[in-house]
Every structure is written in structure tokens, then in C-alpha cells.
Image (spheres, rainbow, N blue to C red):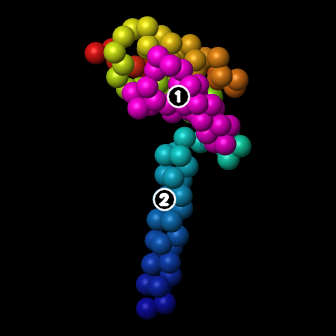
Amino acid sequence: MLNMNRFRMIGVMLALAGSLAACDAISGRETPGAYIDDTTITSKVIAEIVNDPTLKASEVGVETMKSVVQLSGFVDTNQKALRAGELARNVPGVQSVRNNLIVR
């Protein structure tokens, strides 16, 4: 009986350790400071898009991971896609931009 409880406890500990390791892999391996920096970059890119008279914020999705901005969504013209990429590149802290906007 005592050995059975010990095996259960070891099993629970191994399962917990495995789930914690999986969370680290899923989280993108960002430090809290890097996450805050990325959130700030995302907010600034969105603000630039909102303030631009040629773009609609509802058309452009913005995500940032390790200072790399990814733009996604649908726009009406190639010029709008290029303009969104240009705005994102000019935000301080942005290392690169993945412009995945689709013109339709």
C-alpha cells in the first residue's frame, strides 16, 4: 500500500514536470521583458495604422514576437499592403516585418 502511494506521487510529479516543460515550449520562450517590449511594439504599429488615412485598422492584424512584426489580413490595393509594412518598419524597436497582407 505504501509503495503504491509512492508510485502515484512519483507519477503525479513526472506529469507535472512534463506539463511545465510543455508550457515553456508553447510560450515562445520569451522573457517577461521581451513580452512587454513586443506588446509595446504591437501597440505602436497599430497606432500608426489607425492614424494613417489610407488604411483601416480592421483590415490589418498585427502580432509581434521577438521584435519581428507580422502583418496579416486583407487590403484593397498593393499600395495599402506596402504602406502598412512601411509604417511597421519605422516603429522603434522593430527588427523586421513579415508582411503577410493579402490584396483582394
* Residue type, numbered disc 2: Ser
Q: Which mark is residue 30?
A: none
Closest to the observer, 31 or 62: 62
Q: Residue 102: x percent and y percent?
A: 34, 18
Magenta highlight on residue 39:
yes
Magenta highlight on residue 80:
no
Q: Main secondary structure of the magenta part?
A: helix
Placement of 25 over or under 44, stated as above or below:
below
Badge 1 local density, few (<14 within 10 Å), some, or many (20+)?
some
Residue at the extreme front of the image, as rendered: 53
Q: Residue 52: x percent and y percent?
A: 54, 20
Q: Residue at x 41, y 20 (%)?
A: 100
* Residue type, numbered disc 1: Val
Quarter holding the C terminus is top left
Q: Residue 22: x percent and y percent?
A: 49, 52
Q: Is residue 69 visible?
A: no
Residue at the extreme bottom of the image, as rendered: 1
Q: Which mark is residue 50?
A: 1
Q: Residue 37: x percent and y percent?
A: 68, 37
Q: Which mark is residue 19?
A: 2
Q: How many marks?
A: 2
In this rendering, which labeled residue sits more in front, label 1 or label 2? 1
Q: Are marks 1 and 2 in contact (CB under 8 Å)?
A: no
Q: Provide the secondary structure element on which disc 1 rests.
A: helix
Q: Which residues lie in the magenta part?
A: 35-64
